[in-house]
Amino acid sequence: MNQLTQIFKSVRQASRQLLTLPDNQINSILVTLADRLLAETPAILKANRADLDRMDKNDPKYDRLMLTDDRLKGIADDIRNVATLPSPSGKVLKETVRPNGMKLKKISVPFGVIGIIYEARPNVTFDVFSLCFKSGSACILKGGTDAHESNTAIITVIHSVLEEFGLDPNLAVLLPSDREATHALLNATGYVDLIIPRGSSNLINFVRQNAAIPVIETGAGICHTYFDEFGDVTKGAAIINNAKTRRVSVCNALDCAIIHESRLNDLPALCSKLIDSNVVIYADTQSYTALNGNYPAELLKPATPDSFGTEFLSYTMSVKTVPDIQHALGHIEEYSSKHSECIVTENKENAALFTCMVDAACVYTNVSTAFTDGAQFGLGAEIGISTQKLHARGPMALEEITSYKWIIEGNGQTRNE
């Protein structure tokens, strides 16, 4: 048995500790972890700085890699929030008695061992552990080389808390950041129950194509906001600016604004707030004409075919003009990654049509797509945003990382037919 297989086996064995661990102790451990995180902030930030120093500041992943005092405080708050949530395991989902007297219960149970493959996102290390631990699963973490120092510092903090409470540190394991570890994790059948990739579309596609273990995709976010012919300009300008500029490196950031052609005169006002952030706009012919002279020339460029269906992860977006809502729906259908889509309109019929027809995990009316987030949905931290339809969709938190089993009780019943 090679070293990686031995690690997987140890995690599997450790996961059984969680099956009988009382929920109040789980909560105490999470609160202690939040406190320890804050106490170890200088060490974590020092490790993070070593990672940041190796990355180009213009790299879209730089912002995701960066930890700050405020971000660590936010992570600690999320961990404490998870501790306050009810346990997702052991819930009776369905209960019935069959005609022959058999009593059936369908109850939620932990997956067991969850593997997470992610890129330059050290916050994921804390988020994944807190959610997996609360739901009763061990986790195997495979971070990227870009965040290796940060992830190592974070897993050290997690292990110190687990050991303080007499638990096996193999409940959370950080694998080496090399490709061999990725390949081994994707093929750890019998040890790992589920793989969740978090990162670029290239990473997600690679995991989906190479995994021998069930995968839940947390897809890339190619997000649109459609400004309808009945849209309110004040709302639209605020929504577009917030969705684009709040954090450009996240998957719920705006990539393409779609505008009804009858509202092109309002496009300069809709985009005016973007100037403060030096957002580059790739505009189609009609929107380019509307913005030309009303938007800084150095930030306005003609759209190309690559301007649509691209997750920019930067201060860049595209604008598409459509003659009606049907063409807006068609554009979204063609280019959406099925993550988060928004309509800005005061027309209830158009809002209802958009909500019905758009195939995405999260569909908004007059709300920024920036809210696609587990904490914002009241779920605590999140393990990812699922863009698929099997098992889980949208922000994945505690309930989404459990499975279920059937419990059958009887009194000697046998089946004859």
Image (cartoon, grey):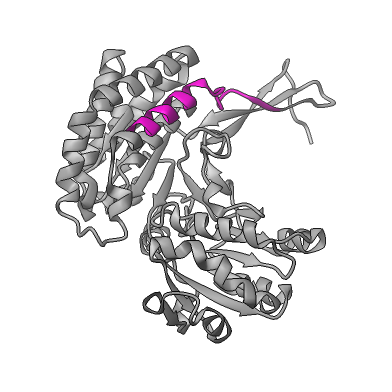
Q: Does the magenta-highlighted stretch encompass residue 54?
A: no
- The residue lying at 59 percent from left, 33 percent from top is 404
The quadrant holding residue 315 is bottom left
Give the magenta-colored segment's residue range.
Answer: 72-93
The quadrant holding residue 346 is bottom right
Please say if 387 is above or below 357: above
Horizontal side, residue 379 vs residue 307: left or right: right
Image quarter where the N terminus lies is top left
On the image, the x and y values in percent for residue 309 come to 49, 72
Horizontal side, residue 333 vs residue 16: left or right: right
- The residue lying at 77 percent from left, 64 percent from top is 350
Say if residue 255 shows up in the picture: no
Horizontal side, residue 45 vs residue 301: left or right: left
On the image, the x and y values in percent for residue 151 come to 24, 39
Q: Observer-nearest residue: 225 or 158?
A: 225
Horizontal side, residue 132 vs residue 235: left or right: left
The quadrant holding residue 378 is top right
Image quarter where the C terminus lies is top right
Please say if 228 is above or below 412: below
Please say if 187 is above or below 27: below
Q: Observer-nearest residue: 57 or 79?
A: 57
Say if residue 32 shows up in the picture: yes
Q: Does the magenta-highlighted stretch encompass residue 86?
A: yes
- The residue lying at 38 percent from left, 56 percent from top is 249
List the single residue furthest toward the right. Answer: 99
On the image, the x and y values in percent for residue 184 come to 28, 49
State how many labels appear. Answer: 0
On the image, the x and y values in percent for residue 301 come to 42, 81
- The residue lying at 56 percent from left, 81 percent from top is 290
